[in-house]
């Protein structure tokens, strides 16, 4: 079982006790505004998503981490790596993603968590590149991607919902040679 630690966070595999707090995150319209068509997800949809991520861990050696606040043990949300099947034009690719509850926004936690997941992808899993995909207008996610060292490489449309997206990318070569790799 892979566990990553940062100064403020523990990134770990999912537990049954994480379903309800993650479902609360997924039920917040502001959190879900930039996810797909903006639809909210209930507890069963959240459970299904967690189970799909766990299957990814087993088959690919990476997936989404539950993000826990070190000082309180509270589940903040998730970060991690997945294959962006919803946007076939970027495949083959591995995407960095994150989703945190609103009470955890604006503190640099998304960047801290995602930087640890990117480091894991390049240094532990030997990935050649990692992409980030965000809907046009989601400036907060674009700022995180920029802090991770990612650069925009294309614009497209998410075929699952018709919304415009920007694709960012970071190659392992650029990551491994960047001064001060830790965002």
Image: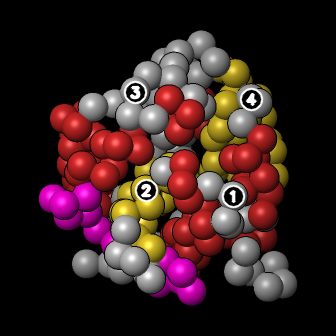
As measured in the structure, the alpha-carbon distance from the residue carrying label 3 to the one carrying label 2 is 15 Å
Q: Please, what secondary structure does the residue beneath circle 2 have?
A: strand
The residue segment tinted magenta is 4-18
Relative to 140, residue 177 above or below: below
> Looking at the image, is mark 3 or mark 4 nearer the viewer?
3
> Is 19 positioned to the left or the right of 143 in the image?
left
Report the quarter where the N terminus lies: bottom left
Count of numbered tags: 4
> Is 163 positioned to the left or the right of 123 in the image?
right
> Is 167 positioned to the left or the right of 118 in the image?
right
The residue wearing badge 4 is 136
Residue 3: x and y in percent read 36, 80
Query: How many other residues sit within 10 Å of disc 4, few (<14), some (14-19) or many (≥20)?
Result: some
Q: Earlier in the sequence, mark 4 or mark 1?
A: 1
Q: Please, what secondary structure does the residue beneath circle 1 have?
A: loop
> Looking at the image, is mark 2 or mark 4 nearer the viewer?
2
The residue wearing badge 3 is 40
């Amino acid at each position: 079982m892979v566990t990553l630690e940062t100064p403020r966070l523990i990134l770990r595999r999912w537990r049954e006790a994480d379903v309800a707090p993650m479902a609360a995150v997924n039920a917040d319209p502001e959190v879900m505004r930039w996810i797909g068509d903006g639809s909210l997800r209930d507890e069963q949809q959240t459970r299904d998503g967690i189970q799909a991520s766990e299957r990814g861990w087993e088959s690919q050696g990476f997936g989404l981490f539950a993000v826990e606040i070190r000082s309180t043990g509270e589940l903040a949300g998730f970060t991690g790596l997945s294959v962006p099947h919803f946007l076939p034009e970027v495949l083959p690719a591995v995407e960095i993603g994150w989703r945190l509850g609103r009470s955890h926004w604006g503190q640099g936690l998304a960047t801290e968590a995602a930087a640890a997941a990117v480091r894991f992808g390049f240094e532990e899993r030997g990935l050649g590149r990692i992409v980030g995909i965000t809907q046009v207008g989601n400036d907060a996610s674009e700022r995180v991607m920029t802090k991770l060292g990612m650069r925009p490489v294309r614009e497209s449309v998410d075929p699952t919902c018709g919304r415009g997206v920007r694709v960012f990318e970071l190659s392992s070569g650029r990551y491994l040679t960047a001064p001060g790799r830790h965002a």
